[in-house]
Image: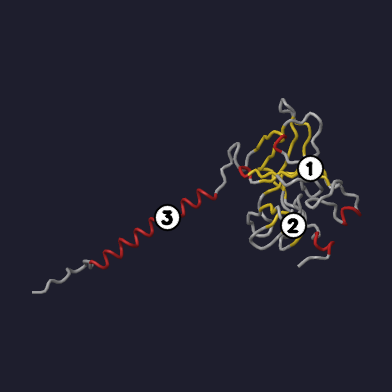
Amino acid sequence: MAVTASAGGISRREFLYYIWGASMAVFTAEFTGLMIWFMLPRFREGEFGGTFTLPIDILPDINAEPADYPDGRFWLSNLDSNQPNDRMWQAQDEEEDGITIRGVAAIYKVCTHLGCIYSWTAANNRFECPCHGSKYRLDGRRIESPAPRTLDRFNLEALDAEGNVLASAEQTEEGFFQALVLPDGTTHIRVDTGDKQDGPQQDLLCDFAGNCP
């Protein structure tokens, strides 16, 4: 005599299907939790979102390649447009307006287009974003789009050996942090990654050179 399933019972196939579905739900929940934990910043001292006190001997030479500080997600550039080279120079509009860019800048390591992580490309002497091709000068000013603005910057202070603040980065009317000239007696700099200001919407540098793509 054939054996039939009792009313309300489930078949072996249905049972395995439910087990598979439950396993996938647990895996998805665990994966989502791990992604959230990884992506959310932790704003403790010494991590992104906090302050970083660094000796000035880590700074690059004037207009040399920038120093990478991955723990804080920023680059340190030592700038002087009066000493031009292939990395840093004075643009036409800056010259006309009498603007000299001089001092140290802490530049956020995220492209202003869609948030990709850009890098310094030594072969081309500029910052380049691998996602959509935005390019920036050593100080973070746009060379080529599609980036809508100059790279963002963090607040920066000059400290003496006792930790006293000797000078702080000045800000434009829009709030953008200017490069900081380190005064005599500076032994350390302090970068506050919790104080970030958006870069301005300056003209593309390639427009002045007539070589925009």
Q: Which residue is mark 3?
A: 29
Identity of the amino acid at label 3? Ala
Q: What is the C-alpha distance between the residues marked 1 and 2?
A: 24 Å
Q: Secondary structure at mark 1?
A: loop
Q: Is residue 200 above or below residue 48?
A: below
Q: Which residue is mark 2?
A: 149
Q: Nearer the viewer, mark 1 or mark 2?
A: 1
Q: Nearer the viewer, mark 3 or mark 1?
A: 1
**Nearest to N terminus: mark 1 or mark 2:** 1
For this orientation, the residue located farthest to the top is 162
Whether the residues at callouts 1 and 2 have beta carbons within 8 Å, the answer is no
- Rendered residue at 69%/54% (across/down): 121
Identity of the amino acid at label 2? Arg
Disc 3 packing (10 Å; few <14; some 14–19; many ≥20): few
Q: What is the C-alpha distance between the residues marked 3 and 1?
A: 50 Å
Screen quadrant of the N terminus: bottom left
Q: Is residue 64 above or below residue 205?
A: above
Whether the residues at callouts 2 and 3 have beta carbons within 8 Å, the answer is no
Identity of the amino acid at label 1? Ile
Task: Specify the label residue 62 is tagged with.
Answer: 1
Where residue 207 sits: x, y (%)? 82, 63
Where residue 210 sits: x, y (%)? 83, 65
For this orientation, the residue located farthest to the left is 1
Task: Specify the label residue 212 is tagged with.
Answer: none
